[in-house]
């Protein structure tokens, strides 16, 4: 499918989903990365007057916030800055009371605290969505979804996922078509969980390798790893299990 046609079809899909839900418009998170930039421009085409981009730093890198703000201003995307630093700090402080975390594996502890960030953002998104009668638009792509690279009930929580059937490489192609600045397209993907964190370093596999696997072109040395990631993350892509009796 040509990129122009793909863009048009996604815009129509977003619009139809919102109308079917009897909602007014869309709310989404704007992180300063390529996925949220693409979602922002597609949403603006679908609902130019009824959208809200939320920039939600949560002990985030300053440059990510600046990139998000600069993008919103450049493309005239209605936005609001909601700083979650104090909310995050207060919750972490409460969770650490009683010493339960003492002695636990430091890597597991860091990840548990880091996952609070996207869950706070999810709560913020749904607050505004409820307030404005809007749908929450997620920014996840197929590559992330299939290997489970998202926080359950965090950035994985959304009403619609317009990029959910596109590989990361396809999202970048769409970004170039839509005019997303090159510096955002080429920026190392990061969930912003901690300073210096990048998606590919954390996963131990590149998006190109994931996309190659999902397209049936993976090298043998990466196939096993990606396949295992897909299997282990099955629970993230499904509703909670219930007894079959």
Image (spheres, grey):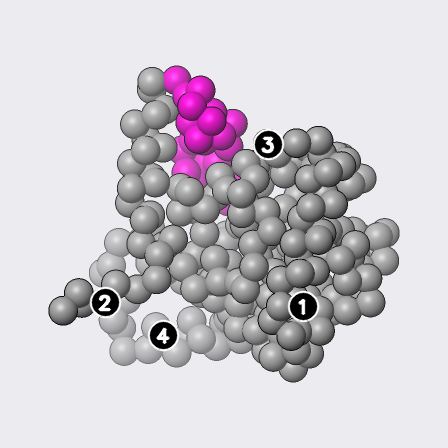
- Residue closer to the observer: 145 or 243: 243
Q: Which class describes the residues within 10 Å of circle 2: few (<14), some (14-19), or many (20+)?
A: few
Which disc, if any, is residue 29? none
Task: Point out the frontmost of discs 3 and 4.
Answer: 3
Res 19 label: 1
Q: Determine contact: label 2, label 3, CB under 8 Å.
A: no
Residue carrying label 2:
242
User: Any mark on residue 169, and which?
Assistant: 3
Residue 55 appears in view: no
Q: Do the CB atoms of the residues marked 4 and 2 lie less than 8 Å apart?
A: no
What residue sits 61% from the left and 34% below the top? Answer: 170
Residue at the outermost left position: 245
Q: Where residue 29 sits in the image (x, y, percent)?
A: 63, 60
Q: x and y percent of residue 153 in the render? A: 43, 64
Q: Quadrant of the C terminus?
A: bottom left
Q: Which residues are magenta?
A: 197-219
User: Does label 1 or label 4 sit earlier along the sequence?
Assistant: 1
Q: Secondary structure at mark 1?
A: helix
Alpha carbon distance from label 2 to label 1: 31 Å
As measured in the structure, the alpha-carbon distance from the residue carrying label 4 to the one carrying label 2 is 29 Å
Which tag is nearer the camera, tag 1 or tag 3? Answer: 1
Q: Dots 2 and 1: beta carbons under 8 Å?
A: no
Q: Earlier in the sequence, mark 2 or mark 1?
A: 1
Residue 228 lies left or right of residue 73; in this view the side is left
The numbered mark, 1 or 3, whose residue comes first in the sequence reads 1
Q: Secondary structure at mark 2?
A: loop
Q: Are marks 3 and 4 in contact (CB under 8 Å)?
A: no
What residue is at 49 percent from the left and 39 percent from the top?
Answer: 143
Q: Residues within 10 Å of mark 3 (few under 14, many from 20)?
A: some
Question: What residue is pinned by disc 4?
Answer: 95
The secondary structure type at the circle numbered 3 is helix
């Amino acid at each position: 499918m040509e990129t122009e046609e793909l863009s048009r079809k996604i815009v129509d899909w977003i619009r139809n989903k919102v109308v079917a839900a009897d909602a007014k418009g869309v709310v989404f998170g704007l992180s300063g990365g390529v996925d949220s930039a693409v979602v922002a421009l597609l949403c603006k085409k679908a609902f130019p007057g009824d959208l809200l981009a939320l920039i939600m730093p949560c002990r985030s890198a300053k440059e990510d916030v600046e990139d998000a703000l600069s993008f919103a201003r450049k493309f005239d995307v209605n936005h609001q800055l909601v700083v979650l630093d104090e909310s995050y700090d207060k919750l972490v402080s409460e969770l650490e009371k009683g010493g339960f975390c003492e002695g636990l594996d430091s890597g597991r502890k860091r990840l548990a605290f880091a996952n609070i960030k996207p869950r706070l953002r999810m709560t913020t998104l749904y607050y505004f969505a409820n307030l404005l009668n809007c749908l929450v638009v997620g920014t996840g792509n197929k590559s992330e979804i299939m290997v489970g690279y998202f926080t359950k009930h965090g950035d994985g929580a959304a009403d619609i996922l317009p990029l959910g059937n596109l590989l990361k490489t396809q999202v970048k192609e769409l970004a170039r078509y839509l005019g997303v600045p090159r510096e955002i397209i080429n920026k190392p993907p990061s969930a912003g969980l901690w300073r210096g964190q990048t998606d590919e370093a954390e996963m131990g596999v590149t998006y190109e390798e994931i996309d190659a696997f999902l397209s049936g072109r993976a090298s043998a040395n990466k196939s096993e790893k990606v396949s295992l990631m897909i299997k282990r993350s099955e629970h993230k892509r499904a509703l909670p299990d219930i007894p079959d009796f």
